[in-house]
Amino acid sequence: LIAGLLAAAFLAERAGLMGWTGLMIGFSGIVVIATPNFSAGSSSTSSVGFGYVLLATLGVAAGNIAIRQLGLRVAPVMAMGLQLIIGAMLLAILAMALEDPTQVNWSGRFLVSLLGLALPGTALAFWMWQITLAHLSVSQAVSFSFVVPIIGLTVGWAYFGETITTITIAGAVISVVGVYLASNGRSDTNEVSRRGQKHAFRAQPSSKPPRHRRASPDR
């Protein structure tokens, strides 16, 4: 929802009635899924956690707008690669300042997990997300984020024995319906036409004037 509002304000995107309806329904499904766990915790813990989630949501929404803008000017792999390098440098500085690097156990299992998170879990996933935002409107792309909690619940149930309740299933169904509506809704944006103009410019032949053959004199 926040990303949709920012896209409307900064990218002139118009998700349309079906798009906004889908986003609202998808968000409602996530609320249904999270409500039992949220109410189970203490009030102080829930408030702090909710604050962190809200800050993270604002950051992700703003990041999606920036990624959308950047993806229209730079190749997706270059754009995402530079973002990950800059983020890794900042995190490395914080890790060195706040943590003790000697406490890391560089075992084979740790290295496999690290490579799995770094390559397919981060680099490949964010590169594909960059490509998605370059081809879809922000409101259509972010609607698929409502599927992430469903995948997380499924993985938790399959590998960690977490319980899936009737409320969880109901929330998942609601979210899927919202994703379907939002992804199929009409989205008008000025950026689409700009991207089309950019691709059309790339497809044009060289601006150099054609070389004409000099006519030979009549014999």
Image (cartoon, rainbow, N blue to C red):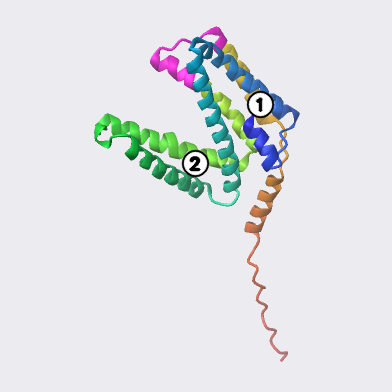
* Along the line of sight, the residue nearer the viewer: 52 or 122: 52
Q: Which residue does the numbered mark 2 point to in the structure image?
A: 127
Membership of 67 in magenta stretch: no
Question: Regarding mark 1 in the picture, which secondary structure is present there?
Answer: helix
Q: Quadrant of residue 122?
A: top left
Q: Quadrant of residue 117?
A: top left
* Along the line of sight, the residue nearer the viewer: 156 or 32: 32
Residue at image position (50%, 10%) is 40
Residue stretch in magenta: 151-168
- The quarter of the picture where the N terminus appears is top right
State yes or no: discs 1 and 2 in contact (Cβ < 8 Å): no
Q: Residue furthest top?
A: 166
* Along the line of sight, the residue nearer the viewer: 198 or 81: 81
Using the image, tell me which numbered label, if any, was put on residue 23. Answer: 1
From the top left corner, tell me how far across and down residue 76 is, in percent.
53, 46
Query: Measured along the vertical axis of the image, is residue 196 above or below residue 63?
Result: below
Membership of 160 in magenta stretch: yes
| Three-letter amino acid code at the position of disc 1 | Leu
N-terminal-most mark, 1 or 2? 1
